[in-house]
Amino acid sequence: MRIEKFEEIESTNEYMKLKSEAEEWDVVYAVLQTKGRGRNGKRWVSNEGGAWFTTVIKENKAVSMSEYVKLPMIIGAALLNTLNTLGINSCKIKWPNDIYVNDKKVCGILVEKSGENFIVGIGINVNIEKFDKEVENIATSLFIESNKKYKIEEIIISTVENIKNYYEIFLRGGWIGIIEIILKNDWLKGKNVDIISGSSIDNGVVKGINKNGEIEIVVSEKLKTYCSGEISIKNIKI
Ligand code: BTN
């Protein structure tokens, strides 16, 4: 694992995309990002105190793209394991791959495809003591949850090692074990949500996640199934 550190960078994902000689499991991290990006084009606040990092997975030609849809969930399950190992035990996965603790987001994952590389960007709120007003009701950190400070580089290394383990389990045909972890820790199950797909909005109650990793939502008394990447989930009523 080659690790590169920046004091400040625009975005570790953008940096890794442009790194032409990037090897699988290379890691780049930064103390702070000035243009951190989240999913759906959102800004990702990346002040000092978080683990802001990106690693690379090379596309394996033996795996079809329809199987690679599971990658964000494999990474989510690996992160859940990392946080459990750190003693944060009440973590849940918000499908497809955000990690929540006590109903607040502690970690986000942004997987992007660039040529033959999957650019895996992860943001974990580690030692952050206080969030800006606009996010303090929806975000938490490992420090807020445990009252402990953590060594950020150690968390980054153990997370990437965990992702590598889970990905290898997946390549060896172990998806069922991974989806079972996700099903046991499904934060959205039973919640009323808005389902955004392009310009259309539906509302429904989440029934759960099926064995393929698709979410099942009851909309107007009909069961609908959605893949990750196809929709985003908003206005969750807890
Ligand atoms: C999300 O929940 O919307 C995903 C957030 C991903 C943030 C990480 S921080 C490191 C990497 N660099 C970025 O610009 N974004 C990802």
Image: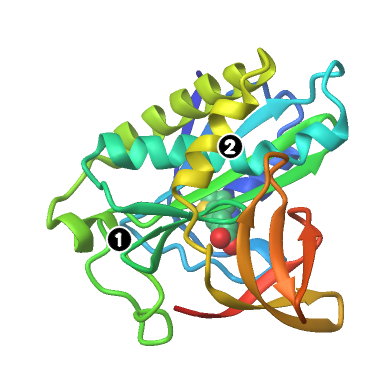
Tell me the kind of residue under disc 1.
Ser
Residue 141 image label: 1
Q: Position of residue 188 (x, y in %)?
A: 53, 64
Q: Which residue in the rendered view is the most extreme toward the bottom?
A: 133
Q: Residue at x 54, y 27 (%)?
A: 177
Say whether residue 82 is left or right of residue 98.
left
Front one among 69 and 206: 206
Q: Residues within 10 Å of mark 1 (few under 14, many from 20)?
A: many
Image-quadrant location for residue 134:
bottom left
Question: Label 1 near label 2: C-beta < 8 Å?
Answer: no
Taking the spot 61% from the left edge, 77% from the top edge, the residue there is 193
Residue at the image point whose x is 61% and y is 42% from the top: 73
Res 237 visible: yes
Q: Image height check: is 238 above or below 7?
A: below
Residue to which mark 2 is pinned: 179
Secondary structure beneath label 2: helix
